[in-house]
Amino acid sequence: MRLLILSFSYAPRANPRATRWTTLAEEFARTGHSVLVVTSWQQGLPEQETVNGVQIYRVGMQSLEHLRRTLSANRPAGTDKAVAGAVPTEAMAQGGMVLRLLKTLNQYIWRKLWWPDSTCIWLRSALNTARRLLAEQPADAVISVSPTFSAVVAGHLLARNRELCKRWIIDLGDPFSFMEQALPNNAFLYGGLNRWFEKRAFLRADGISVTTDGTREMYARLYPACAGKIAVIPPLLSPPPAPAVSGPFFRNHGATRLVFIGTLYRHLRRPDYLLQLFSAMLETHPEFNGELHLIGETHECRESLVFYQQRLGNRLVVHGPVDRSMAAQAMSEADILVNLGNETAFQLPSKLVEYAATGKRIVNISSLASDSSTDFLGSYPAALCLQDQGAVPSAGQVLEFAAFCEDRSRYGIDASALEGFLRPFSLQAVAGHYGSLLA
């Protein structure tokens, strides 16, 4: 079978969809399929190469990336140590002014106008490259991977010619038209267009995959004629890179480490309830020697973190983003892994499968009664799920949290039970689901 995959993100990018589809593409190639991937251009990588049997075409946005790197290099004076004769201070200041101007234009103009999402500039290059590849040899199936939805727009246009594209599959990591907490574009301008185009795409597609039952049920209500096409395909367990061996990630070996790995969002995934809970536990259980570590992008919630860092001192450590191998090392050294559920029932954090694969204790903080993370952890015996009800944690929740953190002997999972829990998320199982859509 000849497969053409449209995915803005692909290795070596390390976001969840890139990791998922790099693994799947290489698995399809290993099992004898011809696999082509059209993805976004990345600095320092060839525009075309074959990796592990997958033909990769990186297209679009070279000039914009060069511009961004050039402006980033010309930072205002004082941001780096001065190098005599390297760049005049005046030029550095001008570069910083231009960069700030571009950021302002992006925030207040470009973000208000793009459609369907921020990767729309990639769309034309991806579409032209895909058309050329299909003209050389038709594909048995084209797979559009979203986010980003630009890949769905390209797939929709390609699928009009069924001689070149015999089957079209949409893979939705996140919903598009009804994601109010993380809008892909200006809903005031494009809300109607979003729903109109998504419906047309669903009608044209031969199969649609989503990651949660809640998403499937919502789409079945929105587009009942397409309900039979929609399949729930769970997260993929992709083994992380081997942890670094240069030394431990954490310094304090005597403390119980609670570790959150991920991105914080102001309107989708806030840490406030977790911080209140951890602070209250330290007040009521002063003998508990514990640390809370946050690893990942956190700038949208900076004010909350600054407040609690002043309050908790070295008990709260904000590490910032790290590469995937370092995150894997932090996960292996953690005593308790922390998940913050999204403020929507339509997303399931893919890292939860990696969390579960460690067999460690997991604390899940949900904002909804219908939290997909709580459902996922329902049969995982070493999990504690607490719901943020919009107020300070109750005394009972603090006691339950403290007991979970302090008594590791009560919570464990044996190897056979863990293997059974993880089986639906294995590469063979997930690839088999997609095989059914492609058949």
Image: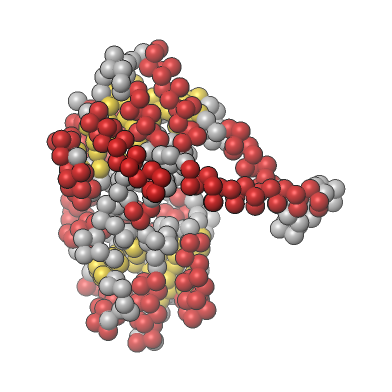
Q: Residue at horizontal 63%, vertical 37%?
A: 66
Left or right side of 133 for 358: left
Location of residue 343 in the rendering, given as x and y in whole percent from the top left corner: 31, 60
Location of residue 305 in the rendering, given as x and y in whole percent from the top left corner: 48, 71
Q: Residue at horizontal 31%, vertical 35%?
A: 197
Point out the image quarter for the C terminus: top left
Residue 149: tell me if it is visible: yes
Compared to residue 156, the image places residue 195 above or below, namely below
Location of residue 279 in the rendering, given as x and y in whole percent from the top left corner: 40, 80
Residue 435: tell me if it is visible: no
Q: Nearer the viewer, residue 117 or 33?
A: 117
Point out the image quarter for the N terminus: top left
Left or right side of 236 for 313: right
Compared to residue 411, the image places residue 372 above or below, namely above
Location of residue 10 in the rendering, given as x and y in whole percent from the top left corner: 43, 37
Left or right side of 68 for 359: left
Outermost residue to the right: 85
Q: Residue at horizontal 48%, vertical 33%?
A: 122
Compared to residue 136, the image places residue 87 above or below, namely below
Q: Quadrant of residue 228?
A: top left
Q: Residue at horizontal 20%, vertical 48%?
A: 218
Q: Nearer the viewer, residue 269 or 313?
A: 269
